[in-house]
Image (cartoon, rainbow, N blue to C red):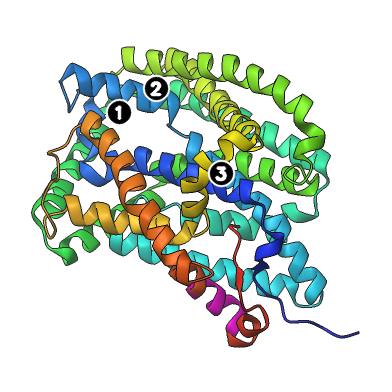
Amino acid sequence: MSISHPQPLPDAERLPILDVLRGFALMGILIMNMPGFSYSWWHEADGSRYWPALLDQRAELVRDALFSGKFNSLFSVLFGLGFTIQFARMQQADPLHADRLYLKRLAVLLAIGVVHACVFWMGDVLHVYAVLGIVLLFGLRRCSDRTLIWVMVGCIVYPLVASLLRVAFVTPEFTAARVALMKGFALTGDAAYGAGNFFDTARENSRIMAFEYGNLYSLWGTFGWYVSMTLTMLLGVLAGRRRWAQRIPELMPQIRRLTWVMLVAGLALSALATAIFDANRTPGPSLIKTFAGLCYNVSRPMVMVFYVLLIVQLFHRDSWRGLFRPFELAGRMPLTNYLMQTLICTTLFYGWGFGLWAKLGPAAGLALSLALFFGVQVPLSYWWLRGHKRGPMESLWARLTYGRTGLRAGAGRTVPSG
């Protein structure tokens, strides 16, 4: 039996709707990450409002209800779906070495994510996807669909249990100490990001990452974040196994019905969670916050699914398809555009750049996010893809994964997310 070189995905096999969804996710991720780029959210650890203007507060509510958690969830769905596509092709090309090759692919992503987090911006999510991809590769990949569904149920139940444990055991004294610690991080962040040089920001990023993974209580919260990403990543795996993206015309009646369910239930729960959290800003766990957390954790995938189903329906109408071209262009080079957001925003806000740290509130940040995505990232994606088959970081990722031989064999091809 001849063994072909594993290669990136041919253009002819790409599904444009997946690129559209990746681009849409990139836009939402920029909106949600803008506060982390532009000021220290730890200033609000004591329940105060860093931005007192009414317009900024309204912008925060809209951002939290419509964007918070929904777009990194979408990206994790696409990562899980991409895993099924990419790994299946690797198994077909070289079944004896597919595990090792995909592990290499994830190791490259992990390295990029760790460098991104510790040097450039501590809000990186790539290392999370890489770690969960390794768990998927060596553990959950072999599970049945039924088992995956039970794991997803556990991912919804776990945050509720964790929150109830905090209510039962976290004391007011411990909460006060944590608030003081967070306020300290806010001050050092202001010094490093607002007034420091590049090396000051890198040191602060590394210090925060060490705290998130080295402090037991913080690690508990970080683990909860991994659980949330696992839920939607496994949804993507199920979508890939059942070929939902390839069966859209067949599934359109169910898609139309489910869209309305996700819209009504998802937005209602998201709005309720946002309102409860906004009205209960006092630090520390409580039963009302536990209920709000449950609403939030259920609404995250529901609102995300609503966005997906709505885009799928509109994209499959000829009169609407052209409007999604900007998202499709950005989504063809997702790794490049994700890292580009860090490059642009740190240059704008950090002291070693234009020094806009803590000078733009949530309303201006929301407008800036849209301006940067459609005014900078989409045109740059269009310009780059006119002369290249993949983005520069996608090319680097592919070369480090497949080597020069695999790339030559797969000339003229692009890499899917996942």
Using the numbered discs, state the Cα–Cα distance from disc 3 to disc 2 in whole angstroms: 35 Å
Q: Amino acid at mark 2?
A: Pro
- The residue indicated by pointer 1 is 175
Q: Amino acid at mark 1?
A: Thr
- Residue 273 magenta-highlighted: no
- The residue indicated by pointer 3 is 21
Mark 3 surroundings within 10 Å by alpha-carbon count, few (fewer than 14), some (14 through 19), many (20 or more): many
Q: Quadrant of the N terminus?
A: bottom right
Numbered disc in front, either 3 or 2: 3
Please, what is the dominant secondary structure of the magenta stretch?
helix
**Chain-order first, disc 3 or disc 1:** 3
Q: Amino acid at mark 3?
A: Leu
Q: Is residue 6 visible?
A: yes
The residues colored magenta run 396-403
Using the numbered discs, state the Cα–Cα distance from disc 3 to disc 1 in whole angstroms: 40 Å
Q: Is residue 99 above or below residue 269?
A: below
State the image coordinates of residue 397 (x, y, percent, origin top left).
52, 71
Query: Looking at the image, do the residues carrying marks 2 and 1 touch, with CB atoms under 8 Å apart?
Result: yes
Residue farthest toward the front in the current orientation of the protein: 319
Q: Is residue 222 above or below residue 412?
A: above
Q: Is residue 225 left or right of residue 83?
A: left
SS at circle 1: helix
Query: Looking at the image, do the residues carrying marks 3 and 1 touch, with CB atoms under 8 Å apart?
Result: no
Q: Is residue 406 above or below residue 196?
A: below
Q: Is residue 226 visible?
A: no
Give the number of the disc on residue 285.
Answer: 2
State the image coordinates of residue 257 (x, y, percent, origin top left).
72, 20
SS at circle 3: helix
In the depicted view, which residue is nearer to us: 96 or 305? Answer: 305
SS at circle 2: loop
The quarter holding residue 33 reads top left
Total number of numbered discs in the rendering: 3
